Every structure is written in structure tokens, then in C-alpha cells.
Amino acid sequence: MSMALALILVAAALTLSGAGWFADPVGSRLMRLVPERYAGARKQAGETRYLELLHRTLAALDPSFRPSEAMLHSLGIARREWVVVIEIAKLFCAATAGLIAIWLAAGFFPSPVMEFAAFSSGFAGLMFAIHASIRAASFRRRARIRRELAFGIEMLCIFLEGGQSLDQAFRSFCDVSAEALPLMADIQRRLIAELNSGVPYEKAIEHWAENIGSDEAKPLAALFVDSLVHGTELVPHLRQFSLDLIEQRISALRASIGVKSSQLTVVMVVFFLPAILAFVAAPAIAGVAAALGASR
């Protein structure tokens, strides 16, 4: 009797937890007792499958979809729905450009080969232009994020050295960084919103790194997670991380100065040197010309 009761209780526990071969039919019947939750779960599962299928289809149609998705993540567009919508809009605009190119080519070269070439040129040209625009915007945002990230790390160190926990430091940073660090403040507000809604720290910090979108965000998120899980000391590592960021910025500035110097040298040789030579040699040339004229 006790064995049968134990088996019944185990089966009930497995059913309610969604495990086992009998979980789906019985669990579905139990979830139907709460219609709103059942409908919401089915809708969410259907939307996830639909987005996954659409995501794979777009990735197969457009080879630049994966790099564009990474660049959109670095722009702060991390939700898959928005990425899919932007990709569909890009394909629609490119197809429209191809049709316009066909219409323009039909007036000059009415042949199927030229129409196909015009459509391909218009489609590929607009796709390349949109991809280049997204890449340029991504690079600009990453540069701004890197400038704000070093100062933001210093602010976090100040809060942590003042005796606050990492959660309190995140919240204090969110409160004081609105004016000084606009990009980081927006990302920080998303992090605090996820923490307030009950998202685990590891997942929320992972989303925080994805919203930042720079190469330095993932190791920084790993430092935060290690501090939360293992209780490691965070401030010395953050200080070293900030110093590394500053060194990288200084190296990048030095490299840009070298590039500007070479560009300026080319400009001076092409534009300034002929004018200087003309200014220096003009009196001598004029004197020689006058002497030759007088000798005649």
C-alpha cells in the first residue's frame, strides 16, 4: 500500500513538473485549468519556433545577415524580433532598388540579360550600402562605448571601495551616470530593469555585455560573474581593466596620428610643393626670360 502511494506521488510530481513521457497530455490538461497561462505559453512557444525558422531562412538567403546581426547587437538592438524586422526591411528595399534598376535599364537596353544585370546591380549595391552604413554606425557606437566604459569602471570602483555590493554599485552607477555617460546609462537601466524583474544575475550580466557590444564587455562580464559566484575581489581587476582600456585608446590615438601625418605629407607634396616651387623659381625664370628677350 505504501509503495503504491509512493509511486502515485512520484508520478504526480513528475506530471506537474513536466517530466516523463506522460507529462505532455496530463500537463496540458492541468495547464488548461488556467486558460490565460496556457494560451500565453503556447503563444510564446509558437512565436519562438516561428522566429527561429525565419531567422534561419534569412541567414540562408543573405550571407551578410550574421555579420549584420552582430553589428546590430553592438548598436544596442539585441532582440531577435527587431533584427529579423530590420533584415526583412533591408531585403525589401534592396529588391525595390533592383526593380527600379530594371525599369531604368528597360528604357535604354531592352533585353532580358540587361534586366537581370540591372536587377543584380541594384539589389547588391543597396545591400552593400546598407551593410556599410550599419557597420559605420556600429564602429562609431563602439568607439563612444569604449570612451565611456573606462570612466564607468572607475565609478564602479569608487562605489565598491565605498563598501557597496556589486548590486548596489550597479544601481548607484545607474542613478548618477545619466548625464555624463548617456550610452552606458541606457544600458545600465536595462540591466537594473532585468534585475528588478527577477532575471538571474548571470543572465542579466550576459545581456548587459550583449547590449554593450564591444570586445571588452565579455571579459568584464566574466569578472562580475566570478565575483558574484566565487566572491573574488573585484576592484584590483577592474583597475587593471581600466588601465588596459586607457592604454588601448592611447595606442589607437598614436596610430591615428601616424596615419594623419602620412596623409598630410601626401597633401603637401601634391598641392603645396608645386606652389612653393613656383614661388621660389618664378623670379629666376622671369629674369632669364627678360635676359633672353633683351639679347634678341
Image (spheres, helix red, strand yellow):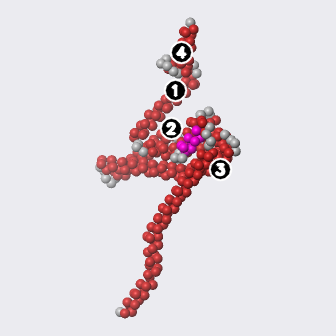
Looking at the image, the residue that sits furthest to the bottom is 295
Query: Is residue 77 something one can see in this rendering?
Result: no
198 or 295: which is nearer to us?
Answer: 198
Q: Is residue 225 in the magenta section?
A: yes
Query: Which element carries disc 2, helix, strand or loop?
Result: helix
Query: Which element carries disc 4, helix, strand or loop?
Result: helix
Q: Is residue 178 left or right of residue 220?
A: right
Label 4, label 2: how far apart the Cα atoms are: 39 Å
Earlier along the polypeptide chain: callout 3 or callout 2? 2
Query: Which element carries disc 1, helix, strand or loop?
Result: helix
Label 1, label 2: how far apart the Cα atoms are: 18 Å
Where is residue 112? Give x, y as percent: 30, 47
Where is residue 120? Give x, y as percent: 36, 48
What type of secondary structure mainly makes up the magenta span? helix
Q: In this rendering, which labeled residue sits more in front, label 3 or label 1?
A: 3
Where is residue 286? Give x, y as percent: 42, 85
Do callouts 1 and 2 mark residues in contact (Cβ within 8 Å)?
no
Residue located beneath label 2 in the image:
81
Residue located beneath label 3 in the image:
179
Residue 42 - label: 1
Earlier along the polypeptide chain: callout 1 or callout 2? 1
Q: Residue at x 50, y 31 (%)?
A: 47
Q: In this rendering, which labeled residue sits more in front, label 4 or label 2?
A: 4
Q: Residue at x 59, y 49 (%)?
A: 240
Q: In this rendering, which labeled residue sits more in front, label 1 or label 4?
A: 4
Query: Which element carries disc 3, helix, strand or loop?
Result: loop
Label 3, label 2: how far apart the Cα atoms are: 30 Å
Disc 3 marks a residue whose amino acid type is: Glu
Disc 2 marks a residue whose amino acid type is: Glu
Looking at the rendering, the stretch of residues picked out in magenta corresponds to: 217-226
Do callouts 4 and 2 mark residues in contact (Cβ within 8 Å)?
no
